[in-house]
Every structure is written in C-alpha cells, then in structure tokens.
Image (spheres, rainbow, N blue to C red):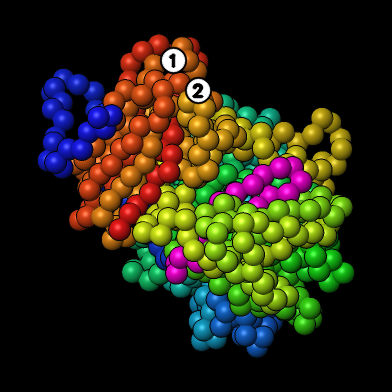
C-alpha cells in the first residue's frame, strides 16, 4: 500500500531539543480575517478621475450618482478620498489638518473634522474611505513635481504620513472621523533616501527606503511588513468593533504578494493602472497566478477601474467590457475611477451589469483560475457558490482570434450538455464536448455556465481557491514573476531599458499548475486538476462539510531526478491523518486519502525528505486531483 491512513490520533514525538518545525500545522486559518471584506469591496475612488485635485463637491456628486443610478444598491458603497485632502500636520499636537478650502463641511472650528462628510455619506447608505501613507510623506510629495494641493508649511507640518503617528492618526480616522476604509500607500518608505534631490534640498527628511521597486533582494520585506502590521493593529484598536477595510497599497513591491493576505483586506499587486490597454494587461497579469492568495477577508487588488477613460472610454466598449469582466472574474475590488457626474447610459450598462457584478461578489470568494494560457488567448474559470461556473475567454491581441472552449476546461462532463449564458449579450446556448468561438480584437466573452460536473460528489481543490491559504509556500527567496506583461509606462515612456519592476511571487502555489509556469505532470502522466506547490510548504484548507480528502501525490516532472524525495502529509485540525511514502522524482503519483468528516481545517504539508539537493529550488510537489468529497 502506498499510503497510510492513520486513525487520527497519531502525534509525532518531537525531541525537546529539536528546532521548531516550520511546517508544523496550527489547526487554524492564518490568513487575515479581521476587518470586513467577505466579498471584494466595491465603490468609487477619487484618484483616477481627479488625481489630487479632489474636493467635497466632486466626492459628494459621485456619491449621489452611486445612489441615484442604483449602483450603490448593486454594492458600490465605498466612497474613497485619495491623495490631496490634507493641508498639514499641526506642529503643536501633531493633529492632521484638512484642506477646508476644498472640504468646506470640515471647517468645524480650530480642529477641522471629516465627521460631517462621513455622517452625510453614511446617511446616504454609503461608506467612507480615507488615504494615508506608511512613511512620513505622501506619493504626491515625493514623485509629482506639479502636484495640486501639496501639504503646506514647515518640514514637520508637511510630514502628513503615518510614520511616527500611527496611533494618533488611526484614532483620528476611525474613532473620531468615523471612516470605514483606509488605503495606506507606501511612497514614504520608497522614495526618500538621503541622496534624493528633495531630501538634499531640505524639502523632506530622509527615511532609509524599505522597498525598492527594482530590487526584491534590496527590499526589507520584514521591515515593511512590520509597519503595515502595526497599522492593522491600530485600526483594530480604534474601530471599536465597527466593520472596516484595510487596503494595502504597496504595488507588488517588498514581496507584498506573499504577505498582504495575512495583514490587510485587499492588497495592491502592481504599480498604478493607466487608461492604456498594455497597462491593463500588466495589472491583470499580477493577479492571474495568485488565485490561492485571495480569499474572503483578503483580496488581490489589481488597482482601480479605468472603465470610461482612454483605451476604455465610450468609444472602446469592447475594451471597457474586457477590463470590467476580468476584474470581476479575478475578484479584484471593483472601485470605479470615473467622474460619475459625466456617467452616460453606455458606461452605466457596464458598471451596472448585475450578472457580472454578481461574479465578483459571489460568496464563495473563488478567484478565477487559468484554464488555458497563451500570450494571445486566456481562458479563466471561476467556480461559484452554487456549484455553477463562469468562464471568460479573453483575446489579449489587437486582431480576431478563434478560441475553443472545452467541457474539460470547465471540469464538466463532455458527454452532457453544457449551457452557456452570455453575460453581455444575454444570449443562451449549449454545447457538448467543445465549442469554437471567434473573439474580436481585445474581446472577452463572458458566460455563466451550468452542466454536469466531472466530480459529482465533491469539489476539486482547484475549484475552491477561496478556501485555501498557502500559509507556507516554500519559496526559498522571493523572485520576480517573469510572466507579467511589461508595458510602456507613461511616466518613463521608452526611455532607458524599460521599467523592470520586480513583482515577487514567482514559484508560489497555484491551482491546476505547478510552480514556475509548469503544468501538473508526474512520471509522464499529466493532470488537469490539482494544486502545485513547492516542497517545504503548508496549505490550509477550510472544510465546508466534506467527509473525505483524496489526492494523487508525487514530485512534478518539472523537478530534478538527482534531488531528494518529498513526503506528503494530510492533517486535520492539528492532527496527522495520513502520510505518503517518500516520493521520488520519476515515481508514479500515489493515492493519499483522509477522513475529514468533523475536521474544520485540513492542512496539506509537503516536506523535502532528506536526499541531495542540487538546486536552490525545492522539488515541486503535486497534489494532483486533490478533492474534498462528500
Ligand atoms: C500611488 C497609488 C495610487 C494613488 C497615488 C496618490 O502610489 O498607487 O493609487 O493613491 O499614489 O498619490
């Protein structure tokens, strides 16, 4: 027998002198579950529409438009004030002072307050969001020469960021001003080394950078994580039980893609989106391979929507619908970045497509998984709470492309009818086996799908990424993800050799794929479902009433023959339930099973088990056909 099924009470005996086991199961879900983001937050933000030229009239007009158009009822509730609201930090007591010339209702005496504005938004049934920076200074101060509404006054008065004021500012934002969301940017810990021109000229104080967008190795990952964690703790203290959203804005730097899920409710995976097709691709690509790193409570944020502007304006309905469809499928927060005073029916029909919004807001919280991938066409599949699916067929190119959708992509039976409902045209049709469609340039065809599931009595793990947390993903050192489209950025153009931003996360755990862009394959046999991860990993899986776990385990064929074997363990609420033999490269996958009837958290541990190691990369460990069964 190639697997052991233990009775569920076996405890490993650990000698007292042994170092703590980094893969020790905890029996608990360790990704962030504080704050309130059971589904991706939705709403509006001032930045894409107005940059720092934000004022009360613009904010309230957009809020009113959300209510009047019915978008608020669809879920667009957060109204977020981005950079540009602050006047200064008062020197006598460190209190932040609002630019009341732009926010007249905040002129409440010597201590300006956003409370009248947040009260008003709350009375409209909306929620209110504010913006700050983790360093001493804001992005506008550091990076933009002609930024409107720069903080004013002395050097100390212009230090409007959280650094050194975390408790005071968070108390002000949440306990006094009653905000419901905070976006915390990271420019202050990125752009103020001692030799920065604005430091040398005496404009700002130096702060040794913690993140370097061009160097993962040069970033202090633990240091920047600590700062963001402290802010999260302060929000918990000062929100007094009110629901809140903590939005991290570190643009994929400092390897935030691996830890953002443990700290905040949503976390930016990339630098700023622009109203450009190529840039939308870049931002999309930073979340595509990260389905396991997003769950109810903590979402990958591909940045705010640019629907309505530039390459996604009224004249570019195909592109606008693609952008929106993809953000919905990938569970990116749907935050409108358009001046809603100008909203026309054509755009409202996009933001207001209830069936598309429903995909994003589906309570299962499964980010869509890549079923087919090329630089030209991608097929994304999302499993919904009721067991049905959605599929997006996306043409990245500027010319028409054929795409074949198969029942296998959907993990549905090829022998029965698969029914498709087009969520844009509302047409319905069905197919068996496979169907071919033509995608216009830049088009996304988006369907709700029902049919007979291949696994009738359970769910594959890769169909439920929202219930899986890669608590330890085994990546020995962060590496940049080479699959991300390198776009021309407006701020650099084609000057120099290109942007070379280092988005970490390459080699992470992935549904239906092995790490480093490889397919699931063990001893020559390919698997189209499973979880690919590195040895030295521990996955936490929330069990929603299933009674059995089953998988085929082995070293992926993308590993190395000369390297040591991998042992696979299944734990239930902290107890070892099953353990595989030591699986060598080239050995056929072996079955592993465990009874999980009363288990809440299943943990899947893959351990390197001695032997040689010829590479810095651990062996890739494959949980093929992994499933929870009734
Ligand atoms: C950037 C951030 C943008 C916007 C801007 C404000 O760092 O990514 O979304 O907030 O700062 O200056």
Please check the rendered image and state whether residue 374 is part of the magenta-colored stretch, yes or no. Answer: yes
Residue 419: quadrant of the picture:
bottom right
* Residue 611 x, y percent position in the rendering: 36, 13
Question: Dot 1: what SS?
Answer: loop
Residue 558 visible (yes or no): yes
Q: Residue drawn at (57%, 66%), measured in percent from left and top?
A: 417
Label 1 environment density (alpha carbons within 10 Å; few <14, some 14–19, many ≥20): some
* Residue 563 x, y percent position in the rendering: 44, 15
Query: Mark 1 near mark 2, Cβ–Cβ under 8 Å?
Result: yes
Question: Dot 2: what SS?
Answer: loop
* Residue 507 x, y percent position in the rendering: 53, 33
Q: Nearer the viewer, residue 72 or 168?
A: 72
Residue 238: quadrant of the picture:
bottom left
Q: Nearer the viewer, residue 627 or 472?
A: 627
Which label number is shown at residue 563? 1
Q: Is residue 338 left or right of residue 417?
A: right
Label 2 environment density (alpha carbons within 10 Å; few <14, some 14–19, many ≥20): many
Please check the rendered image and state whether residue 381 is part of the magenta-colored stretch, yes or no. Answer: yes
């Amino acid at each position: 027998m190639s697997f052991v099924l233990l009775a569920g009470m076996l405890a490993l005996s650990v000698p007292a002198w042994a170092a703590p086991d980094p893969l020790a199961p905890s029996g608990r879900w360790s990704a962030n579950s504080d704050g309130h983001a059971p589904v991706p937050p939705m709403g509006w933000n001032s930045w894409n529409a107005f940059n720092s030229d934000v004022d009360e009239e613009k904010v309230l007009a957009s809020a009113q438009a959300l209510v009047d158009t019915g978008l608020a009822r669809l879920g667009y509730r957060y109204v977020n004030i981005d950079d540009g609201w602050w006047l200064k930090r008062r020197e006598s007591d460190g209190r932040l002072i609002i630019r009341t010339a732009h926010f007249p209702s905040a002129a409440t005496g010597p201590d300006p307050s956003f409370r009248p504005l947040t009260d008003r938004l709350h009375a409209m049934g909306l929620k209110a969001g504010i913006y700050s920076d983790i360093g001493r200074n804001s992005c506008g101060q550091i990076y933009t020469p002609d930024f409107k509404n720069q903080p004013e006054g002395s050097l100390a008065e212009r230090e409007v960021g959280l650094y050194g004021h975390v408790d005071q500012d968070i108390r002000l934002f949440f306990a006094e001003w009653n905000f419901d969301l905070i976006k915390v940017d990271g420019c202050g810990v990125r752009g103020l080394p001692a030799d920065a021109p604005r430091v040398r000229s005496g404009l700002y104080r130096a702060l040794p950078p913690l993140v370097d967008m061009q160097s993962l190795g040069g970033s202090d990952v633990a240091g920047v994580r600590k700062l963001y964690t402290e802010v999260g703790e302060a929000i918990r203290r000062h929100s007094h039980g009110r629901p809140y959203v903590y939005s991290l804005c570190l643009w994929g730097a400092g390897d935030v893609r691996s830890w953002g899920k443990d700290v905040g409710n949503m976390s930016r995976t990339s630098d700023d989106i622009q109203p450009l097709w190529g840039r939308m691709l870049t931002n999309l690509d930073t979340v595509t391979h990260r389905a396991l790193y997003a769950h109810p409570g903590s979402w990958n944020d591909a940045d705010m929507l640019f629907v309505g502007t530039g390459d996604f304006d009224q004249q570019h309905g195909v592109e606008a619908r693609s952008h929106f469809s993809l953000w919905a499928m990938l569970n990116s927060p749907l935050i409108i970045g358009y001046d809603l005073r100008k909203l026309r029916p054509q755009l409202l029909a996009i933001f207001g497509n209830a069936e598309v919004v429903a995909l994003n807001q589906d309570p299962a919280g499964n980010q869509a998984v890549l079923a087919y991938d090329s630089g030209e066409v991608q097929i994304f599949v999302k499993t919904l709470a009721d067991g049905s699916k959605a599929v997006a067929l996306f043409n990245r190119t500027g010319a028409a492309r054929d795409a074949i959708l198969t029942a296998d992509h959907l993990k549905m039976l090829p022998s029965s009818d698969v029914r498709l409902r087009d969520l844009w045209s509302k047409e319905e049709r069905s197919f068996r086996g496979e169907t071919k469609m033509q995608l216009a340039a830049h088009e996304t065809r988006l369907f709700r799908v029902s049919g007979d599931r291949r696994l009738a009595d359970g769910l594959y793990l890769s169909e439920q990424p929202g219930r899986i947390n890669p608590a330890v993903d085994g990546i020995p050192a962060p590496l940049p993800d080479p699959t991300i489209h390198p776009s021309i950025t407006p701020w650099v153009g084609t000057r120099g050799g290109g942007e070379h931003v280092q988005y970490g996360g390459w080699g992470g755990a992935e549904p239906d794929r092995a790490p480093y862009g490889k397919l699931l394959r063990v001893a020559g046999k390919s698997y189209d479902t499973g979880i690919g991860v590195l040895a030295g990993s521990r996955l936490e899986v929330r069990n929603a009433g299933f009674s059995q776990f089953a998988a085929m385990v082995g070293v992926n064929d993308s590993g190395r023959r000369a390297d040591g074997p991998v042992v696979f363990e299944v734990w239930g609420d902290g107890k070892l339930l099953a353990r595989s033999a030591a699986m060598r490269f080239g050995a056929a996958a072996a079955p592993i099973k465990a009874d999980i009837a009363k288990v809440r958290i299943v943990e899947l541990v893959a351990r390197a088990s001695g032997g040689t190691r010829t590479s810095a990369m651990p062996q890739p460990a494959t949980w093929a056909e992994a499933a929870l069964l009734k």
